[in-house]
Image: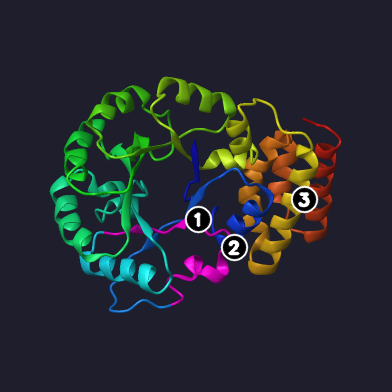
Amino acid sequence: MHLILAPLHGFTDSTFRNVYFKHFHALDEAMAPFISLTHADKITPLKVRELLPLNNHFKALIPQILGNETSEFILLCNYLSDELGYTEVNWNLGCPIRGIVNKKRGSGILPYPELIDSLLSEIIPSIRLKLSVKLRLGLNSAEEFPAVIDVLNKYPLSNITLHPRIGIQQYEGTVMLDEFEGMLPLIHHSLIYNGDIHRYDQFVAISNRFPAISSFMLGRGIFHNPFLPEMIREGKSVLPAGAEERYSRYYRELEDTIKTEKHFWMSKMKEYWKYFGAFMHVDEKSLLELLRCKDEMEWNRLTSLHLNRFMEGAL
C-alpha cells in the first residue's frame, strides 16, 4: 500500500505539510501544489520557495509543474534536480480551472494529444529527473482519454495518477468509475488512483473494485479526517485510540503556525474549518457563526468551545 498526499492549492502548502506530518505518519509521500511556468531565463528562489528543503521537514516531496512551454519546463526541472536535489517531478494535466484550461494547460491540454507528444519528445531527453503525470479522463469527455494514453504509453514515465473526472466537471458530481474501469487495460504505466476518497468505506469500495491498484492519492479526505491514512493502513473503520487528544494538538499547532506565518491567518483557517467542522460534528449554525467571525478573541472562544466539546467525546 502506497499513500500520497494530493497537491491542493491553498491547502497543502509547506506550512500545512510540516504540521500534518509531525502529527500523522501514515502517508508515504506528498505532492506539492503546482508551480506555474513563467517566461524567464532563470529560476529565482522566490519561485521555488515552497519547495526549498529548509521549508520542508518531510523529505518525501514531489514537485509539480503546470504549463506547456518546453524550454521553461526543462529549465525548472533541471533547477529542481541540480539545485534542490529532487529526483522526480510531476506534470499537471488535470487542473480544471477555466483560466488555466483556456491556455491549454492542466486538463485544457487533454484534447490535444499531439501537443502532449511534442512536448514530451523534447522534455524527456532533456531533464535529469523522473517524470510522472497527473491527469483526468479528459476535458470535455472521457472519449479523449485513449488518444492521450496512447501518447503517454510511448514515454518512460515513472507513474500516472488518474482522477476519474473530466475537466468540465471541475470538482463537482461523482467520479466516473465505469469509464475509469474501461480505460484501465489501456494504461501501461504504474497507476495511482485519486478521487473522492473522503471516508474509510469509500476507500474500501474503490480498493475492492480495483484490487490491482495499490497506490492511492488522498486530498480532501485528509481534511475530512486526518486519521484516514492510518485507518486505511490498519484496516479499521473507527478512529484510533486517543484521537481526540491528538487532533486537538494537531489543530492547535496548525493554527499557531499559520498565525505566525500568514498575514490573513483567520481567512486561511476558515477554509480549513469548512472541513474541520464536519469532522468535529459542528452544527451548521455554529459553523456559520465561526466562519463569519472577524474578532480574534471571539474566534478563540468559539474554536476552543468546539475543540473542548470534541475532546469530551462529541464523536
Residue drawn at x 36%, y 57% is 89
Percent across and percent down for residue 61 are 48, 57
Q: Quadrant of residue 287?
A: top right
Helix, strand or loop at mark 3 = helix
Q: Is residue 178 left or right of residue 46?
A: left
Q: Is residue 69 left or right of residue 269?
A: left
**Residue 63 covered by magenta stretch:** yes
Q: Which residue is mark 1?
A: 60
| Label 1 – label 3 distance at C-alpha | 23 Å
Q: Is residue 14 above or below residue 275?
A: below
Q: Which mark is residue 57?
A: 2
Q: Which mark is residue 249?
A: 3
**Residue 55 covered by magenta stretch:** yes
Q: How many marks?
A: 3
Residue drawn at x 69%, y 56% is 254
| Label 2 – label 3 distance at C-alpha | 18 Å
Single out the mark in the foreground, 2 or 3: 2
Contact, mark 1 vs mark 3 (Cβ under 8 Å): no
Identify the amino acid type marked 2.
His
Q: Quadrant of residue 220?
A: top right
Q: Is residue 187 left or right of residue 209?
A: left
Contact, mark 2 vs mark 3 (Cβ under 8 Å): no
Helix, strand or loop at mark 1 = loop
Residue 306 appears in view: yes
State the extent of the magenta-drawn residues as a range: 45-67
> Considering depth in this image, is 25 or 20 the residue closer to the camera?
25
Single out the mark in the foreground, 1 or 3: 1
Identify the amino acid type marked 1.
Ala
